[in-house]
Image (cartoon, helix red, strand yellow):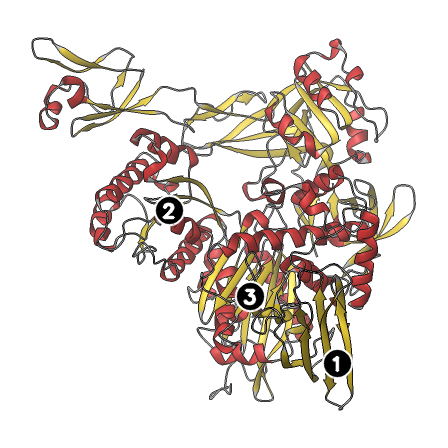
């Protein structure tokens, strides 16, 4: 996409994460927007600073050191707009994920309908449901009141009543919320989002009135069979920003710098994935994975429809014990190619919670860290799938839908010792099906670009098209129900040079075709033993043009789901072999 | 690069903001001297309410019920008090089912907040109340020795310190918990046995300071009613030499154990404190600094976890760790004179 006006077009994006604050600079180089540089500093939202400003200043100062460009003036303010001497910037965007997850009570009528939608809405930002109120929970009115008062939520999300549907029971819920608010000190009252039957908006307004800050959003469940979360997601993001501004000093200033458009990092990340899904094959979705300290975010978009899931319980920082609360040690242990005891893993997890910014130094600790990332991504995808559309292409029940591409980011992936480590972590965790491209967002640019998109879509598009994102590999996944060692796919490769080669892929293996980065090749896929390569069903093959990524083209024939040997020494051998295949 | 700071100080001045989670009642006054277990304030964190249907109780219509109310919103009531009535020849009345306060009346209903034991916020350390925060708490100031930990089970107490640890890597076993430790605060090494925690609670100890603990004991440690502070972390970890030296030389001193949970957003950190009488000027420790050569640092994770050393040089650019990760690093000389290269992310300044 070509921009029409590129004068005064530099953009500074600041992302305040749980552990790191990043300042990212974009500008026009040779007629196109480019990612120029990134400056990183520790986030200072927590003690002893308790103000994000220090971390932001340091990240920007680092960026100034790298680029030699003055961004902050003598008055300690951003230089806006840019000057002829090259100093300053023209636009600013901010994203934020730092802070403890918002504590939310979800209120609805029926557990499987409006209450489920309210809970899914909560999971679109950095929040967690601490309790629920529904028609079937058999709580007396005073018990509802006591529950709300004891939980001391940051937010109450009320859904319920389809359009032209129930009214009285919804109003009774709203009355309980209003009464609870009236019994709290004004500064401790939760913010309330009403996303139920629109006909009740006026009555809700009457009952909540000046009691507490409240918001309205279109009904998340306008009809029994219809769920619409998108408009309410915008409100949730607004609430997130409002509460963060009051709880974390400096967030209000960042919001001002951003023109009151400070965006939750996950929302901005989702926006980019949503955009990509409009560009790529509508028969497949686009999957985004951001595995961070504050949460693991799964953004899946299907032909422009975004399904966003933010899971603080699967973050690799303070929330990391969530992996134990929502799974078992064995689930983590299976991803570690070494003999590591349960106690050691448990101790590791709780030490990581204390020091989320710390890094593994030994190979053993790196293996545990990557195992935790695998499990976090895997659990988050399972949780997110609940919100995926029902009618989407997939190779079978229980398998991941077809995605093209899969874009991943997060320090555990971008800081890995090699791209082989990053790709193997992703292949194990995501277990893609069909034919897909796995892209690594090495500099964590997706969220800044998502935040920039509403004010400068050209910038986002042109940077996405640039080499700032690293294609790790095109991945082909033949799925067959056969014994390990059985040939399940015959591949005929025609390189751009005209060279040709053929070989068989066996069940249980991971292979890499050395197609150089950016070079195309034509593959003829001939499934054997009725394997499914995502070309129309089991046994159906065809010809496909692929482009080599950093690791060429990878054929993952390890089966779905991947079953690893219980014996650690056999696991270690396999892992070494797979890693060696992916370049070590 | 910004450096986190942990305090292990033989003499310092500290101020702690002691805040209720919600608005409540502040029970201390400015200038008051408090002990670690004195109540600074209290609030009703888990209120219980009772909603009474007057109409049904009196056997009248909803529209009529309010006419028979005998008490008003805001009044305190005792269990058995008549709230409404009498009505009719049977003289039906509605009585308070519990003691409490009437919150609301109307539309034939009455809402009572039951009297319950309030949550009590303790001072956490001995000292002087230097300022009040209306409705929320107070600031307590004190001078003495401070050791900060990384995990606490949420309890607070104080007592005479008894040192059970001989060397930094000692393991606490049940047989070390003699009956003569009853009512004291024990300082010990690693605890990996749930029987030890049970024995400590049965004695009972008034507090337990551990170098480290098995993470599998967290659920039990959170249930036990004596404060437990962990200085280093989880797994078999020796205590850092600075904390070890300070605490073993404090045997038989009165020590406050504030095992509040680590919450860096709320400025909460578990710590132990020994109040000391001083005449000289003592300053507050700094909480924030930048990494620089000459600093005493503690190592946060393996290898060399919990060891103390001196930061020799900050490495320019990125260094490659043994596992291949590239990151900013420093050279650190450990107390045994060995020099090691470690990521800055794994260090904190110890002062």
User: Judging from the image, what secondary structure is the residue with disc 1 in?
Assistant: loop
Q: Which mark is residue A115?
A: 2
Question: Residue at label 3?
Answer: A287
Q: Which mark is residue A516?
A: 1
Relative to the observer, which residue lies in front, B40 or A15?
A15
Q: Is residue A90 left or right of residue B184?
A: left
Q: Residue furthest front?
A: A529
Q: Position of residue B219 (x, y in %)?
A: 62, 29
Q: Position of residue A337 (x, y in %)?
A: 79, 51
Figure quadrant of residue A446: bottom right
Q: Are marks 3 and 2 on the same chain?
A: yes
Q: How many marks?
A: 3
User: Judging from the image, what secondary structure is the residue with disc 2 in?
Assistant: helix
Q: Residue at x 80, y 68 (%)?
A: A583
Disc 2 from disc 1: Cα separation: 50 Å
Q: Work out which quarter of the rendered image holds the C terminus of chain A and state it.
A: bottom right
């Amino acid at each position: 996409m070509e921009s029409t006006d590129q004068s005064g077009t530099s953009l500074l994006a600041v992302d305040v994460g749980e552990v790191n604050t990043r300042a990212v600079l974009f500008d026009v180089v040779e007629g196109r927007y480019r990612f120029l540089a990134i400056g990183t500093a520790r986030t200072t939202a927590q003690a002893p600073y308790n103000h994000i400003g220090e971390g932001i200043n340091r990240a920007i100062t680092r960026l100034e050191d790298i680029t030699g460009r003055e961004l902050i003036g003598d008055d300690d303010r951003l230089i806006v707009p840019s000057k002829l001497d090259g100093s300053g910037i023209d636009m600013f965007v901010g994203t934020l994920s730092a802070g403890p997850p918002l504590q939310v009570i979800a209120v609805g009528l029926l557990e499987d309908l409006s209450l489920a939608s309210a809970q899914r809405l909560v999971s679109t930002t950095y929040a967690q449901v601490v309790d629920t109120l529904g028609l079937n929970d058999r709580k007396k009115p005073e018990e509802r009141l006591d529950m709300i008062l004891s939980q001391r939520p940051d937010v109450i999300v009320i859904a319920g009543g389809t359009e032209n549907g129930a009214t009285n029971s919804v109003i009774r819920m709203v009355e309980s919320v209003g009464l609870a608010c009236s019994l709290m000190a004004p500064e401790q009252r939760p913010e309330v989002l009403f996303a139920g039957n629109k006909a009740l908006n006026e009555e809700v307004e009457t009952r909540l009135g000046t009691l507490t800050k409240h918001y309205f959003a279109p009904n998340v469940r306008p009809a029994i069979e219809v769920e619409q979360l998108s408009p309410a997601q915008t409100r949730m993001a607004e609430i997130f920003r409002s509460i963060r501004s009051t709880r974390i000093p400096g967030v209000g200033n960042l919001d001002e710098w951003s023109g009151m458009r400070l965006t939750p990092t996950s929302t901005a990340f989702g926006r980019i994935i949503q955009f990509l899904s409009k560009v790529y094959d509508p028969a497949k979705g686009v999957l985004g994975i951001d595995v961070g300290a504050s949460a693991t975010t799964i953004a899946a978009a299907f032909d422009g429809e975004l399904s966003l899931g933010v899971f603080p319980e699967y973050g690799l920082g303070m929330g990391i014990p969530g992996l134990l609360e929502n799974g078992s040690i064995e689930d983590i242990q299976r991803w570690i190619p070494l003999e590591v005891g349960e106690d050691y893993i448990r101790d590791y997890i709780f030490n990581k919670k204390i020091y989320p910014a710390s890094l593994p130094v030994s190979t053993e600790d790196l293996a545990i860290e990557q195992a935790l990332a695998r499990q976090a991504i895997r659990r988050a995808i399972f949780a997110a799938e609940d919100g995926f559309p029902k009618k989407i292409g997939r190779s079978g029940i229980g398998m991941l839908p077809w995605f093209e591409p899969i874009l991943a980011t997060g320090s555990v992936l971008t800081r890995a010792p090699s791209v082989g480590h990053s790709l193997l972590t992703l292949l194990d965790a995501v277990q893609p099906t069909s034919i897909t491209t796995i892209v690594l967002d090495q500099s964590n640019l997706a969220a800044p670009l998502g935040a920039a998109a509403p004010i400068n879509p050209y910038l986002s598009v042109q940077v996405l098209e640039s080499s700032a994102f690293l294609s790790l590999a095109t991945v082909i996944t033949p799925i067959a129900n056969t014994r390990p060692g059985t040939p399940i796919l015959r591949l005929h490769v025609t390189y751009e040079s005209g060279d040709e080669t053929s070989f068989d892929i066996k069940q249980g293996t991971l292979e890499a075709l050395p197609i150089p980065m950016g070079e195309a090749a034509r593959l003829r896929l001939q499934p054997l033993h009725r394997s499914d390569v995502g070309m129309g069903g089991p046994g159906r093959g065809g010809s496909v043009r692929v482009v080599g990524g950093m690791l060429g083209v990878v054929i993952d024939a390890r089966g779905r789901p991947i079953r690893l040997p219980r014996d650690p020494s056999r696991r270690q051998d396999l892992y070494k072999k797979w890693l060696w295949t992916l370049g070590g | 690069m910004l450096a986190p700071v942990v305090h292990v100080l033989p003499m310092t001045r500290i101020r702690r903001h002691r805040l209720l989670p919600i608005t409540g009642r502040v029970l201390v006054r400015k200038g008051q001297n408090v002990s670690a277990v004195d109540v600074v304030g209290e609030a009703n964190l888990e209120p219980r309410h009772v909603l009474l249907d007057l109409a049904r109780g009196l056997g009248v219509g909803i529209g009529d019920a309010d006419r028979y109310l005998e008490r008003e919103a805001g009044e305190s009531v005792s269990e058995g008090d008549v709230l409404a009535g009498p009505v009719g020849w049977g003289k039906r009345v509605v009585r308070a089912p519990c003691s409490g306060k009437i919150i609301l009346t109307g539309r034939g209903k009455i809402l009572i907040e039951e009297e319950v034991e309030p949550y009590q916020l303790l001072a956490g350390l001995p000292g002087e109340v230097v300022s009040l925060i209306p409705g929320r708490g107070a600031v307590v100031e004190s001078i003495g020795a401070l050791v900060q930990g990384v995990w606490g089970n949420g309890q607070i107490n104080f007592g005479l310190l008894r040192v059970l640890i001989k060397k930094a890597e000692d393991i606490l076993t049940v047989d070390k918990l003699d009956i003569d430790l009853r009512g004291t605060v024990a300082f010990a090494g690693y605890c990996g046995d749930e029987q030890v925690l049970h024995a400590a609670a049965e004695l009972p100890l008034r507090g337990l300071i551990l170098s480290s603990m098995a993470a599998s004991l967290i659920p039990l440690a959170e249930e036990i009613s004596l404060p437990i502070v962990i200085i280093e972390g989880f797994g078999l970890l020796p205590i850092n030499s600075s904390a070890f030296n300070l605490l073993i030389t404090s045997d038989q001193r009165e020590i406050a154990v504030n095992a509040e949970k680590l919450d860096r957003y709320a400025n909460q950190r578990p710590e132990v404190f020994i109040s000391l009488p001083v005449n000289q000027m003592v300053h507050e420790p700094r909480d924030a600094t930048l990494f620089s050569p000459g600093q005493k640092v503690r190592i946060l994770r393996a290898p060399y976890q919990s060891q103390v050393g001196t930061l020799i040089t900050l490495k320019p650019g990125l260094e490659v760790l043994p596992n291949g990760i590239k990151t900013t690093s420093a050279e650190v000389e450990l107390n045994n004179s060995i020099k090691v290269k470690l990521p800055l992310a794994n260090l904190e300044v110890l002062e």
